[in-house]
Amino acid sequence: MLVVNSVTKKYHKTVANDNISFKVDNGEIAILLGPNGAGKSTIIKSILGLLKYEGKIELDGLDNHSIEAKRKMGYVPEVPALYDMLTVEEHLEFVRRAYKIEDKGCAEALLSRFELEDKRKKLGKELSKGMQQKVSICCALLPNPDFIVFDEPMVGLDPHAIKELKGIFTELKNQGKTVLISTHMIDTVEDYWDVAYIMKNGKIEATQYNNKTDTEEKSLEQLFFEITEDKNA
Amino acid sequence: MLNSLLYRYRKQFIKKPVNMLLSLVAVVFVIFMILFPTLMQIDSEEAIMYDSEIVSGLFGILSFVCFFISISAVTKGKITGYSLADVNFHFAGPFSRKFNKIISVIGNIQISLVICFVFCCQSALIYSISGITSVDLVVMLVLIFMSTITGSLLSNIFAPVVADNESLKRAVSVVIYACVGVFILFGFVEVYKAAGSVSSILSLGLPTIIKLVGNSPISRFFPYSGWFSSVYVGIITHNYLLLIISIVLSVLGIAAVVYFLDRLDIEYYELASETALKVADLVAARKAGVDSDTARINNKVKVGKEIFNRGWGANAFMHKNFFEYKRQTKFFFVNPLSVFYRIFIFVYLMIMSKTNPDLVFMESLFMNFILNAVIYAGGKSVLEFNRPFFYMIPEKAGVKLWYCILADIPTMIFDSVICLISMLILTDRNMVSVLGWVFYMIMFVTFDLFCEFMAVIIIKKFSGLDKIGLTIVRNLIIYAVSGITVLIGYILMNAFRLSFAWLFVFCTIGFVVESLILSLIVPPLLNQME
């Protein structure tokens, strides 16, 4: 379970995250929605321990900066940055060694699932943006993390990979993993989220639960535009 | 953790066979240059007397320079040595912060390797003035590493502290540059005391200046660089008090670095990620052909009322290059990088002219060849061929090529004039006739042309290499071909017992012929690539 408690992050006088608190339970998919500059990437980087902030972030009761917590985390960055001179399979081997994973079969399964088998010998610098994103996703999934963060994961992916990724989200949820997805593409997340946090100006402006039985509740899209287009807010 | 890191480095390294080969050649060369003093001492008649004061002076200066280069990064408030992939895989992965700092140090070791290589290239000269031994050279290489790594670590420790505070960043810059000023001032005072007047300083000669500057009190006890170098100086001069003090200070200094590494983690990842992102953006921009070789200078230039309205079709390249030179220096024929190199060569040769005047003529020729190859083989015109704009212009490749090259000809002529003036000042102008000096100028213009043509071919033929590999291959090929040209000219001059001026004539003819041949090869090559 991820617990974010009163996190504030400032860049000089700009408040990127203003006293943000939320939690994501095991087996739950949470999405962070918001326009550009809302503070989504900042809170994600804080969760991953890449930024210094005020407040507290814990993963299964462990401080997010600890090595133990990092072993439980997977991260798909917004900008897929691979090592230029490592091939696709060497990236996976590097991650396998870094996370001390004994089983070599997981990498093969992921390569097959994301149709990367014929690209296994390609160098990082030879791959297109979309292919790099697929490799990033494979690297993040390889350690079988308990908590996984996707920062704009659909950007650059082809329709097949998007479909595959959506399937993976559901699988992760069924396995009891904690999933956090940051995006500003509402239509790509409509069908599988459990809780949505809508961010604006560094704050969480609304929290919406995906209760499909409640027909009177506003759709996520309606709520999003209502909040983000509010000129007085 | 280490297992995965070593796996990555191993896999990355073996993907670059050219770099591996070049590294091997460089290592063999360095070993040879280290052994050079030992080989010279075998023949006792040729052996140079060992002067421990010059050697210790060299230790002091070199150690200081390495330390200063690496620590001065702190003034930019940046943490270097990480890529964006390091941020994604290492910072967000199961690696400890201490472990991740190793990556940064490894990244910065490249600076040490370059300094070591350049230093070893000079071992013959150093031996000739000091009688330095091979053991001294090995210790000096270790010293270069220690000073650079310590400087890099200190820079990475304190950069996050000053990054967000402009006034603190300025204060740190002032302190660092003040230290350099104090170092130079102390050195100058020592030199002045020995010379008696400012005008007599150069007549002391390079070895004496090194001896005095490198052994000044500030050099001996300058934090880190002075302490490290003094350990070995204490050994070779049998100064045990200096040895003990410098060992104690070095140990305490290293302990302080380790302590700070452990404690000061303020915004460490944040700043490193920020720098890595900026570097990644720059690399992406370069791949897209957006940047230029003078992007940093252009950033600060105000365009004001200037209007770029000349050139049509392929001709636009020529005027664009003129325009850029004019913006930077006010003159369309002045390349700022070239002027900087000329000043550097001039100062170096001015010192050498007082030390060993017989060598100045040859050294001047040699250094101008080396640096002209750097300027023109990697210059503005050559870079056009790495960018998409060049290929998008609907003109014949040969026409575009010539307009690019034409833009550099005024710069080449201006450079040759500067080269000539410096030669006339520093050497005996009667060594060569007036016509000979004219050919000296023409020779450099033809050499510059040759470099540009050769560079374009190498860029196209070795496009798979990375930037460093490409630069090394390019320079090696240019130096090899031009070296053979000069050698043939020298043999002809001696065979016909002609004056030195004829060497310039033969070289000019050689470079003209080579340039003509290359100018026939390049356009079809560019057409193919298009």
Image (cartoon, rainbow, N blue to C red):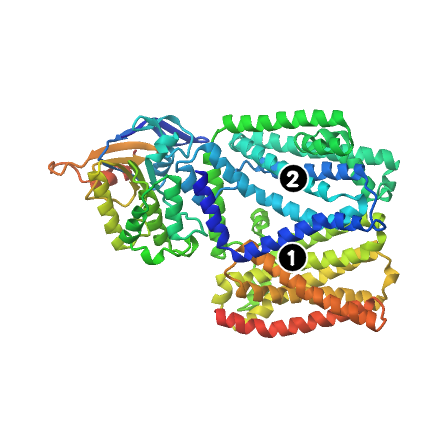
Q: Percent position (x, y) of residue B218? A: 74, 30
Q: Are marks 1 and 2 in contact (CB under 8 Å)?
A: no
- Asked if residue B390 is positioned above or below residue A196 in the image, the reply reads below
Would you say residue B347 is visible in this rendering? no
- Ranked by sequence position, the earlier of labels 1 and 2 is 2
- Asked if residue B516 is positioned above or below residue B303 in the image, the reply reads below
Taking the image as shown, residue A59 lies to the left or right of residue B149, namely: left
Taking the image as shown, residue B74 lies to the left or right of residue B37, namely: left
Taking the image as shown, residue A78 lies to the left or right of residue B195, namely: left
Q: Percent position (x, y) of residue B493? A: 81, 70
Residue at point 57%, 64% (across, down)? B458
Q: Residues within 10 Å of mark 1 (few under 14, many from 20)?
A: some
What residue is disc 1 on?
Answer: B374
- Asked if residue B283 is positioned above or below residue B394 in the image, the reply reads above
Residue at point 69%, 46% (across, down)? B119
In this view, the residue in front, B130 or B47, is B47
In this view, the residue in front, B463 or B380, is B463
Identify the image quadrant of the N terminus of chain B.
top left
Residue at point 34%, 41% (across, down)? A101
**Tag 1 subunit:** B
Q: Percent position (x, y) of residue B65? A: 68, 39
What residue is disc 2 on?
Answer: B142
Q: Percent position (x, y) of residue B107? A: 54, 43
> From mark 1 to mark 2, how far is it between C-alphas?
29 Å
**Tag 2 subunit:** B
